[in-house]
Image (tube, rainbow, N blue to C red):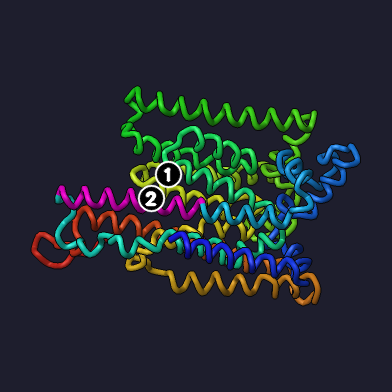
Amino acid sequence: MAAPLTLLLIVAVTIRAALYRSSLVDIISERVEVVSPLTAWKRVVEGLALLDLGVSPYAGDVFHETPLIIYLFHFVIDYAEITFMLADVITAVALYMSAQEYNKQVFRKQRFALEADRYPMDCIELIRSPKEMYYIPLKVAMFYLLNPFTILSCVAKATCGLNNAVISLFILATIKGNVLLSAIFLSLATYQSIYPLTLCASALLYLMQRQYIPVNPRRASFWWFVAQYAFMYLGSLFVIVGLSFFLLGSWDFLPSVYGFILSVPDLTPNIGLFWYFFAEMFEHFRLFFLCVFQINVFFYTIPLSVKLKEHPVFLIFMQLAVISIFKSYPTVGDIALYMAFLPLWNHLHRFLRNIFLVSCVLLSCSALFPVLWHLWIYAGSANSNFYYAITLLFNVAQILLVSDYFYAFLRREHHLTYGLYLKRKDGSEATLVLK
């Protein structure tokens, strides 16, 4: 499998290198779907210019990335293109290795369940074979590297590619069962954009399963492990924040980065739900609805964790999707990360209900974004309502996609427990209704 992966990496890097040398770079780097006020490369360059002049990069209202990012590019500014390509390669390889390890564990659990006769006889066709699982890691890497959303983000030098690399390393460390590295990478991801904090629940659930610790709040072992992980996570976060203060010499980055993410002062149009709503909002209602919108990202963690406590890897997929939909400044690079997991769930296709319709809507919206932007900003024959309408449709399609996979996953698990062909007491065929 190493040879196909190597070939895939070479093709992906070649495509990016060719686009870097094309005239499309300036156009792509200005697209509001690809970059946001947080991740735009020109804002990083502006921050670097202020830093070189001895002025705090957070003195104005331009730069809103973390101090570690600006100091990273302070040293590798001449190799920025290589840095972003390398970030995509790291992400793809980490996702590849994660999928490989996850498939091994799934196959092992299936084998034990089959030996113990836990599956009904009529659902053997739902069991995943090693042959169909063999190419899934390569497909995961391909879905990330060759996804147009990923390529556009890399060519635009959007810093969300670096965030994706950190999150993918967190996923790899978690699936490999390395508690310390999982906590460190999660703290680094949280430091970058706050929202990955929600992934803490799925990491705890997976690591406890890996170490055979019962997920039972009434057991002392449960709380002891939670305390250990929390100590490593908070300790790592404290060290990273302290290092940022040491490099910058002030706490200016806290309101400029995290205050900016949470308060959403910049209403530049993007593919998210915030900008239009708050542009039309009366000021005295702003704080209330801001809290409602921000809580949306974190609220789903509890019910999803309760429902999927036996399946933490699928929970990670669901939470990444929720973050990319409901965060304050989303870009297409965030969407590319959770979409890379779709080949991992190809065994759910028989239970998906709206996949064709949702795929068509997502493709149509992706094509219409630049069209409606041009009509609004340049031609003047449309207005912000047109652009927000397509944004709203794009996010509804994402929600339908994720909920469809959620339904399919729960239905398959139900069939694996109760059988594929359900019967009523009178022997007639029953209909499964999930509520």
Q: Residue at x 8, y 63 (%)?
A: 426
Please state if 347 lies on the left or on the right of 428 as rendered: right
Of all residues, the one furthest to the right in this rendering is: 53
Looking at the picture, how far across and down is residue 82, in whole percent? 69, 56
Q: Amino acid at mark 1?
A: Ile
Determine the CA span between mark 2 and mark 1: 7 Å
Q: Magenta span: helix, strand or loop, mainly?
A: helix
Residue 265 on the magenta segment: no
Percent x, y for residue 355? 43, 69
Instruction: Work out whether residue 231 can be spotted.
Output: yes
User: Can you give x and y, in whole percent of width and height, for residue 250 in the image?
Assistant: 79, 29
User: Which residue is drawn at the image coordinates 78% and 72% (left, top)?
Assistant: 23
Are there few (<14), some (14-19), or many (20+) residues within 10 Å of tag 1?
Answer: many
Name the residue beneath numbered marker 2. 102
Where on the picture, by quarter, is residue 80? bottom right
Q: What segment is highlighted magenta in the picture?
A: 94-116
Q: Is the C terminus in the top left, top right, bottom left or bottom right quadrant?
A: bottom left
